[in-house]
Image: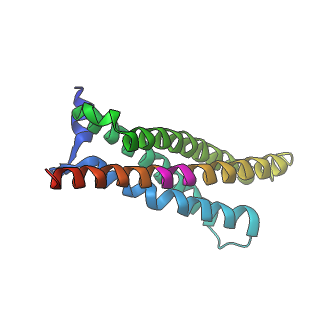
Amino acid sequence: MSSYACVMEQLFDLPAHPLLVHVPVVVVPVVTFALLWWVVIRKYPKGFPLFTVVLSLIAGVGLLLASSSGEALVEAFGYLREEPFVREHIKASESARLWGVVTTVLVVMGYFAKRLVGRVPVLATVSKVVLVAALAASISASGFTIQAGHNGAKARWIDIQFESNR
C-alpha cells in the first residue's frame, strides 16, 4: 500500500472516507444552486461569482479527497469491491468526480471570461456558454454525488446488518 493511501485511510485516528465524503455531499449540490442563481436568475450580491468559484474549488477538492480515501478503504478491505452496492457506489463516485472536476474547471473559466468582458467583448458570449455548460455539469455532479452517497450508505448499512446477524 502506498504511503498516500495510508494517509487517506485514517484522519484523526478515524476512518477518513466517512468523514471526507460529507464535504462533496453538502457542497456539490450547493454549487449547483449557486450556479443556478448566477446563470439563470442573474440578480446576485456583489462577490457572489467569486463565492461560487471558491465553493466549486472546495467541491472539486472534496470529491478528489473522498475518492482517494475510498480507494484506500477498498485497498485495505479488498473483498468489499465485489459487493454489488460497493460496485455501484464506486461507479457513481467516479462519475461524480469527473463531473465535479469538469464543473470546477468550467466555473473558473466562466468567472475569468466574465471578468475580461470589458477588454474582449466576444467573451460575453463565451462566458454565458461556459457557465451554462458548468451548470449542466454541476447538475450531473450533484446527481452522481447523491447516487454515490446513497449506494455507499446502503453498502455500509448492509455490512452492519450482516455483522449484527452473525
Q: Give the image's coloring scheme.
A: rainbow
Figure check: 133 above or below 40: above
Front residue of this view, candidates 1 and 88: 88
Front residue of this view, candidates 145 and 127: 145
* Residue 39 image offset from top left, x and y in percent: 73, 61
Q: What residue span does the magenta drawing correspond to?
A: 142-147
* Residue 48 image offset from top left, x and y in percent: 62, 66
Q: What residue is drawn where x is 34% and y is 38%?
A: 83
Question: Which part of the image, by quadrant, shows the N terminus?
Answer: top left
Front residue of this view, candidates 45 and 27: 27
Front residue of this view, candidates 90 and 141: 90
Decide whether the magenta segment is chiefly helix, strand or loop: helix
Q: How many marks?
A: 0
Q: What residue is drawn where x is 48% and y is 38%?
A: 91
* Residue 19 image offset from top left, x and y in percent: 29, 55
Q: What residue is drawn where x is 82% and y is 51%?
A: 124
Q: Is residue 42 left or right of residue 91?
A: right
Q: Is residue 62 left or right of residue 4?
A: right
Give the residue at the far top of this rendering: 1
